[in-house]
Amino acid sequence: MTRRIEQVHARYADVMAGTLANYIPELTRADPRHFGIALVTADGHQYAVGDVDVAFTIQSVSKAFTYGMALDHCGPATVEKHVGVEPSGEAFNSISLEAGTGRPRNPMINAGAIAVTGLVPDLPDEPRFDHILDTFSRYAGRGLDWDREVFASESATGFRNRAIANLLRASEVIPDPVDEVVEDYFRQCAILVDCVDLATMAATLANGGTNPSTGDRVLEPGHVEKVLSVMSTCGMYDYSGTWTYEVGLPAKSGVGGGVIGVLPGQFGVAMFSPLLDVNGNSVRGVAACRDLSRVFDLHLLRAPSMSAHAIRRTYLLSEVASTRGRPAVDEAILAEHGNEVVVIELQGDLFATCLERLVREVDERIARAHTFVVDLRRTGTWDQSTTGLLRGVAADVRTAGARLVVADPGGTVGESTFDGLDVTVAPSLDEALLACEEDLLAASGRPDPAAARFAVDEFSLTRALDPDGRARLQEALTTRSWSPGEDIVVQDDEADALFLLAEGVARVSYADPATGLETRIADLYPGVVFGELSVVGRDRRSATVRARTPVRCHVLERPRLDALREEAPRVYTQVLEHLLLSSSDRLRRANREAASLRA
Ligand code: GLN
């Protein structure tokens, strides 16, 4: 990024075309060589090249921000009564007033901007200009000052602006006393900024009205688009049409040499170079902005597809599973019916057209589906109409006799969205999948697996042995019990036994060594064998297994296993063979899941 910006900067650094604004005498003291470019992303990262810490007066760039203040303070309806939103196609200081009403054409030319400054309240405990300076400071994320000399210079020579203000007063677009409004407008124009300040102010607009560095919400989000609209149509005065055609960014320039551009949702950019063209726009600012737009493909109307990638993937419950370890009977039921549960994973910031993709996907599959899981874990912002559409999907799914489960850990859409629609909102994808599995299993009418009791010879491990092997194994086993909450196996402990879970439910969880945070890996039900990997590999335990209910296990202690190897190598081999087979089954399943995740 920096390199690209440097290249653009270098391309225009020697251009000395244009003239300093001289109708405000003090502005002729600017150094015509100064040239800076700063870019601040919508999440607050800064890139700065050239004279980015030279202070200059904000001048007309201020118009965009006071317009926002007026919108926030008076509301759009009142603001629109005082100033229009039509481009005038005229110079910044034109006397461009609507016939009949005397209303200035738009807030980006002086007439409109003076009217807008008049809309900012002048209160005894907060004088108008204090309010403006304070708001601009919040946009910039630091306390700004203003240039008394530039102010005095403009005030002493600003006959035209005073005339405009008096015309506005005549048609009651601004209140009395006129002079105070004009002086505050001059002060507002004399606020001192540098390139990084301006880029941060622009980034605040790009970020929906919240300063990305300080998190301060300076402008109501709903008003941001209004400010940006008049910037796109009127921000560059009589050059605005060409600007939008060539650069395609809402922008605002000032005779101090500043120019800002905003790419909504992405970043704000600011240029500073005091030499101006005939329109009063910075020569190098305009040229550099045009280049940046080309280099980075910024034209706003070159819109990428917002919805093409809204669905990250669609898969069936038969391809994945929740983290609950299931007895073989249950796995068979899930394998058979898992294809009736369709999981649709959405991603990104969602708009109405993204939901339209979801609607189509649900539509295509609804004839064969019993349940839809909509996974919102990777979604960003939702607007109201999008949430409304999701509710519509829920209603349709219900009408079709199917069920909707929403995995929404971030609480992005909120349960109230589905009031009255019988939708399950789960706090994680795992919980959502679990709910679907339990549903399928309950519908199959099979007995509750948690209540099952497995005798030694009912385990698939024992069934894999011949009668002699079975007898020897039985002999080697001891029975142990645990109360709910008790650890059966502790992560990092030495592996000293293999467990055949005869009764009760146990939970496997993994504690992150750095944070100590526990993640649930699986729930184990009667009929499973666990602890074998570390026993065979003579490793430390890779996870903790804890009783959730009263648990009873048949346990093969390490010395007994070793004895079996010495005394009955054939049985030992059969045991290992079985463990190898069941681990490879699990590995196969994990591979299948991994493959479906990658797809
Ligand atoms: N203060 C200046 C004026 O009113 C601002 C004009 C500008 O920056 N285009 O003339």
Image (cartoon, grey):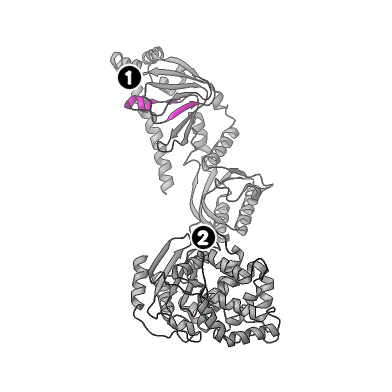
The residue at 46%/15% (across/down) is 479
Q: Is residue 517 above or below residue 181?
A: above
Residue 338 versus residue 297 in the image, above or below: above
Residue 301 shows up from this direction: no
Span shown in magenta: 528-549
Q: Residue at x 46, y 72 (%)?
A: 299
In percent of the image, x 59 and y 72: which residue is there? 66
Magenta segment includes 540:
yes
Instruction: Confirm or deny contact between disc 2 and disc 1 (CB under 8 A).
Output: no
Mark carried by residue 307: 2
Residue 53 visible in the snapshot? yes
Identify the residue position indicated by label 1 in the image. 572
SS at badge 2: loop
Which numbered mark, 2 or 1, is in the foreground of this view?
2
Decide: is 413 above or below 261: above
Residue 133: quarter of image:
bottom right
The image quadrant where one finds the N terminus is bottom left
Mark 2: amino acid: Ser
Say which label, 2 or 1, has the lower sequence index.
2
Q: Label 1: how many residues lie within 10 Å, few (<14), some (14-19) or many (20+)? A: many
**Rendered location of residue 360, percent (x, y):** 56, 56
Q: Residues within 10 Å of mark 2 (few under 14, many from 20)?
A: some
Left or right: 103 with respect to 201? Answer: right
> Which of 145/220 is in front?
145
